[in-house]
Amino acid sequence: MAENTALTDERIPTVIADRVDIVYRVNGTTGGRGSATAALNRMLRRKASEKAAGTRIVHAVKNVSFVAHKGEAIGLIGTNGSGKSTLLKAIAGLLPVERGKIYTDGQPSLLGVNAALMSDLTGERNVYLGGLAMGMTREQIKERYQEIVDFSGINEKGDFISLPMRTYSSGMGSRLRFSIAAAKDHDVLLIDEALATGDAKFRSRSAERIRQMREHAGTVFLVSHSNSSILETCERALWLERGELRMDGPAEDVIKAYEEFTGDGKKKPKPKAA
Ligand SMILES: Nc1ncnc2c1ncn2[C@@H]1O[C@H](COP(=O)(O)OP(=O)(O)OP(=O)(O)O)[C@@H](O)[C@H]1O
């Protein structure tokens, strides 16, 4: 019996990207001087030609379409500069799209930006600051405080939570950021390489927390250069290359194709006998 799959698909879409193009405009790429005359010239000539006004266009994301559903964890992969972070920022509503549309159901949170932490404040103050920035009440944060600190493991080697965050290593900072963000269930959680600097123990703990967040009906996007992190955490992957969506499918298949592309999957050639 032929069924209409569109009608039988009961998954709930959370993010829809419909032929999205994202463009950066970089000013002052000719002349090189930021004088008032140059700025005035740019303003006057903008309409005539962006190129003539010294504006360089960087077309970071090109014609990208996909639908993400509740309960999905989606990895974003691609070589450096392929548009992954740009796409995440646009989903979070932090960058405008040039063409196309992004629809989101619920509030997307970009890890590291939404938790607007301050390096001069102690870890403890930042837990409160980040929690408040995510819309938690003081009481809710107080209740979860110990859990957040324990999850981050910041205090495993001493009382670091009472020191300013600028004294943390990059791994410690990203662990605390992830722990704060993970204290709340998000409709759409966008994670940009935040787990890369954590050690193996923390990575597996955060993979477990991401699984829990998905069970609470959220959608998680994870940008990572670690193919194993993507395989551990996500069942689906999007591969971006030069701003274009090369592949969208089961994480294993996409990673396999990506590794063939980058040469990572191939066996290293045996050294020649002398
Ligand atoms: N603020 C910006 N202004 C101008 N161009 C930018 C800006 N941010 C990124 N780009 C350009 O947009 C393109 C995509 O960059 P993006 O940071 O999204 O890539 P990425 O896939 O996240 O890279 P990486 O893996 O290195 O983090 C690149 O060509 C980059 O140079």
Image (tube, rainbow, N blue to C red):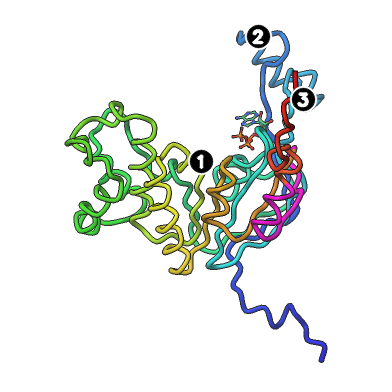
Q: Residues within 10 Å of mark 2 (few under 14, many from 20)?
A: few
Mark in front: 1 vs 2: 1
Amino acid at pointer 1 = Glu
Under circle 3, the secondary element is loop
Q: Locate residue 29: give its quadrant.
A: top right
Q: List x then y, in percent, for residue 103.
A: 62, 59
Q: Looking at mark 1, is its residue's CB closer than 8 Å to ligand 1? A: yes
Is tag 1's residue or tag 2's residue first in the polypeptide sequence?
2
Examine the rendered structure and indicate whether residue 127 appears above or below residue 65: above
User: Which stretch is magenta?
Assistant: 242-257
How far apart in space, not on screen, are marks 3 and 2 (Cα)? 16 Å
The quadrant the N terminus occupies is bottom right
Q: Upstream in the sequence, badge 3 or badge 1?
A: 3
Q: CA distance from mark 3 to mark 1?
A: 33 Å
Please tell me whether residue 175 belongs to the stretch shown in magenta. Answer: no
x%, y% of residue 86? 62, 40
Q: Please say if 244 is above or below 144.
A: above
Q: Nearer the viewer, residue 60 or 103?
A: 60
Q: Which residue is mark 3?
A: 50
Which residue matches tag 2? 37
Q: Quadrant of residue 272?
A: top right
Tell how many labels.
3
**In the image, what residue occupies the spot 39% across and 61% down?**
185
Q: Tell me if 217 is positioned left or right of 28 in this view.
A: left
Q: Nearer the viewer, residue 191 or 38?
A: 191
Count neighbours of disc 3 (C-alpha within 10 A) and say few if under 14, some if 14 to 19, many if 20 or more: some
Q: Which residue is mark 1?
A: 193
Residue 34's mark? none
